[in-house]
Amino acid sequence: MTTINTTHDSGHDGHHDEGSYLTPIKGGFIVNAIRWATTIDHKKIGMMYLVAVLFMFFLGGMMAMAVRAELWEPTRVLADGTVTGQLFQWGEGADKGYENFNRIFTIHGAVMVFLVIIPGVPAVLG
């Protein structure tokens, strides 16, 4: 007669609970940031990917709102460089407002395509 061996003689003793990957590990903020930045855990990498794509979506959305605000009243130039001029160091000129509009529109398109849509497609499809 044959007997069935129900003991599991494998290389590991079973799964041990490591806790949630979202709970901070003792050691402070810098230790946790280094552990998150150097992780190979797929759950943490997915969370970092999600945060990066959502941040870029927010940034591109703010640029879209700036474009829409510029188009609200065609005779008035909102992107005149008083706020964004110090950031991008745009020069003086007669067509400065229109150049700023074109730059904001171009940066908005590049951010939304290359930093939101293209990284978002593999994230959605798994």
Image (tube, rainbow, N blue to C red):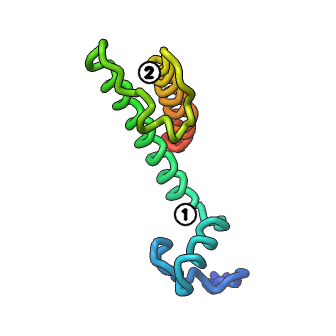
Residue 68 percent across, percent down from the top left = 33, 24
- The answer to which of 61 and 97 lies nearer the viewer is 97
* Residue drawn where x is 58% and y is 76% of the image: 30
| Left or right relative to 28: residue 34 | right
The quadrant the N terminus occupies is: bottom right
* Residue 99 to residue 114: above or below: above
Q: Do the residues bearing badges 1 and 2 touch, measured as CB atoms within 8 Å?
A: no
- The answer to which of 40 and 110 lies nearer the viewer is 110
| Left or right relative to 115: residue 2 | right
For the residues labelled 1 and 2, the Cα–Cα distance comes to 43 Å
The mark found on residue 123 in the picture is: none
Q: How many marks?
A: 2
- Outermost residue toward the top in this view: 75
* Residue drawn where x is 58% and y is 59% of the image: 45
**Foreground tag (1 vs 2):** 2
- The answer to which of 78 and 63 lies nearer the viewer is 78
- Outermost residue toward the right in this view: 11
* Residue 22 to residue 26: above or below: above
* Residue drawn where x is 41% and y is 35% of the image: 82
The mark found on residue 44 in the picture is: 1
**Residue 3 visible in this rendered orientation of the protein:** no
Residue 99 percent across, percent down from the top left = 50, 19
Q: Secondary structure at mark 2?
A: helix
Q: What's under tag 2, amino acid-wise?
A: Gly
Q: What's under tag 1, amino acid-wise?
A: Lys
* Residue drawn where x is 63% and y is 81% of the image: 4
Report the residue marked by disc 2: 97
